[in-house]
Amino acid sequence: MLNIALARAKVFQLVARCWNGGDKTRMYFTIWEHKSGGIYKSVKYGRKLPCNGKPQYGRIYNAKIGTRYRVSIQLAGKRHTAEAWLQNYG
């Protein structure tokens, strides 16, 4: 899963959740900031987040307004339902 979004506020947030069906699947995410020349720099990541149906958050508190960010989400284990969205506030 991959999203590209433009930061419109100082706080840029990823909200993601997944359901594992009892097989202990875990979720990983990475948020990258777009740099010049088409290069992206990793600015936030989450490791081994539980797939229990509850929202998991990844926040950047000093997002640069007008900057593009790229988000990827991976599931470690079997394929399951996942849901994600991006928010700007602050």
Image (cartoon, rainbow, N blue to C red):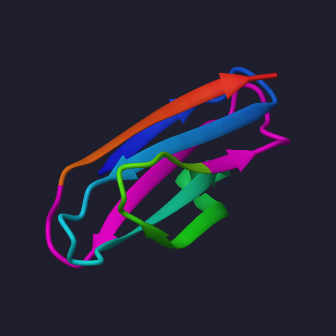
In this view, the residue in front, 79 or 36, is 79
In this view, the residue in front, 32 or 90, is 90
Seen in the image, is 13 located left or right of residue 9?
left
Seen in the image, is 89 located left or right of residue 4?
right
Which quadrant would residue 78 be assigned to in this image?
Answer: bottom left
Residue 76 spot, x, y in % from top left? 30, 77
In this view, the residue in front, 69 or 52, is 52
View extreme (front): residue: 22
Against 35, residue 13 (above or below) is above
Seen in the image, is 79 located left or right of residue 1?
left
Give the residue at x 29% y 51%.
1
Magenta stretch containing residue 54, yes or no?
Answer: no
State the extent of the magenta-drawn residues as a range: 58-80
Residue 4 spot, x, y in % from top left? 45, 38
Residue 2 spot, x, y in % from top left? 35, 48
Give the residue at x 29% y 77%.
24
Number of numbered discs present?
0
Give the residue at x 17% y 64%.
21
Give the residue at x 51% y 33%.
86
Q: Could you tell me which quadrant the C terminus lies in?
A: top right
Residue 9 spot, x, y in % from top left? 76, 23
Against 51, residue 65 (above or below) is above
